Amino acid sequence: MAMVRLAAGFVVYTSLGHILSSLAVILRTTDKIVWANEFEPIELTCLIESISTNNPRIEWKKIKNGVPSYVYFQNKIAGKQLGLSSARGPQHFRAGSQASKRSCMNGDLEHRAQLREPANILIFNTSRSDTAEYRCEVAAIDDQRDFDEILISLAVRVKPVVPRCSVPEAVTVGTSTELRCLENEGFPAPQYRWFHNNEELPQDPKNSHKFLNSSYSINPDTGGLKFRRVRKEDAGEYYCQAKNDAGHAQCPPQMMEVYDVDILGIFLKSFAAVAVFFCLAASICHSLKRGCFHKKGHNENNYNWPAQNDGVNYRDADEGHFRHKSSFII
Ligand SMILES: *[C@@H]1O[C@H](CO)[C@@H](O)[C@H](O)[C@H]1NC(C)=O
Ligand SMILES: *[C@@H]1O[C@H](CO)[C@@H](O)[C@H](O)[C@H]1NC(C)=O
């Protein structure tokens, strides 16, 4: 007897449950968090698990920074003019005007999307401005539970553009330096990799036989490539690549030269150069001076000597004459 009652109760309970659930609109989605690549199509699924109303009212809203705007409303994809203000009563006017402004700013889905059975929204050509939360709302007037909604968050991946790279043209051995790489368009934020003479630098030089002795470190999040002490072997062409799930881009290779500079060598070289200069200058000056005095001295002698010895000795005078002549010859 008790068994029969229990069984009857179970039957009543399950059938009641069945009736109740058949009188409720219940939504489901395959993905609550959806990623799409920019310029590619994506479908946001809004599956109706149960419903008894024939013509449910289906609406989609986009919520960006807490501000909602219509995506699908009154059986069509909402255009630019259609904000929440035109859809709801005056109490929603303020929010609506904000939303329509917002949707104008973001660009809406008119001509870029369509509703697909049962209540999915298909975006043909996603744009980065589509990154937002989307709410599928279904109102089923003949159901006991006559409303359900589901929230889907869409993130549109954006391919990185060519990053801006800064590579010093010349550095000296033993000094520290940093190469930088920056890219601002990519979403999610890209990871950075560096290449030296077309060969990727391993994240940690200790893990590679070739770069074992290099003192660099790479920050893949910021794009920095830091050398604690530059070596001769670090010279070469460098470029950086910014990469995320949507794609990658790289800057053109730039040359970094490494100069060997020792202070003592520079000092000695410049000292030697200065010394050579002075020696040269002094010797030129000295030889010029000597040349002048030598000539002058001869002339004095030649003019004075014959005068002094004029009447004394002809031979001497002759000699003087000869010298005079010879000095001219010289
Ligand atoms: C998608 O949109 C962009 C501009 O927003 C356009 O350049 C591109 O051709 C479109 N792609 C397709 C497949 O329609
Ligand atoms: C690294 O340095 C060590 C010792 O200075 C040397 O024996 C080795 O050949 C160097 N390795 C490379 C790859 O340059």
Image (cartoon, rainbow, N blue to C red):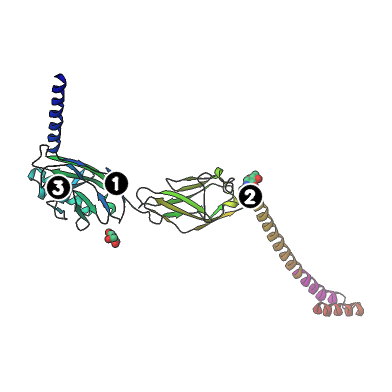
Q: Which of 138 and 26 lies nearest the eye of the viewer?
A: 26
Q: Where in the figure is residue 241, as x and y percent of width and height?
A: 44, 53
Q: Where in the figure is residue 69, as x and y percent of width and height?
A: 18, 48
Q: Where in the figure is residue 41, as x and y percent of width and height?
A: 28, 55
At x 13%, y 38%, the residue is: 22
Question: What is the three-letter code of the residue carrying label 3?
Answer: Ile
Query: Which residues, given as a range, are shown in magenta?
Result: 292-307
- The quadrant where residue 272 appears: bottom right
Residue 58 got which mark? Answer: 3
* Quarter holding ligand 1: bottom left
Question: Which secondary structure type mostly characterizes the magenta part of the structure?
Answer: helix
**Pointers 3 and 1 in contact (CB under 8 A)?**
no
Q: Is residue 143 left or right of residue 130?
A: left
Up-down relation of residue 152 to residue 275 (above or below): above
At x 16%, y 21%, the residue is: 3
Q: Which of 315 and 163 lies nearest the eye of the viewer?
A: 163
Question: What is the three-letter code of the residue carrying label 1?
Answer: Val
Is the CB–ligand 2 distance for label 2 below 8 Å?
no
Q: CA distance from mark 3 to mark 1?
A: 20 Å
Asked which secondary structure carries label 3, the reply is: strand
- The quadrant where residue 279 appears: bottom right
The residue tagged 1 is: 34
Q: Badge 3: few (under 14), some or many (20 or more) residues near its Cα, within 10 Å?
A: many
Q: Residue furthest top?
A: 2
Up-down relation of residue 11 to residue 174 (above or below): above
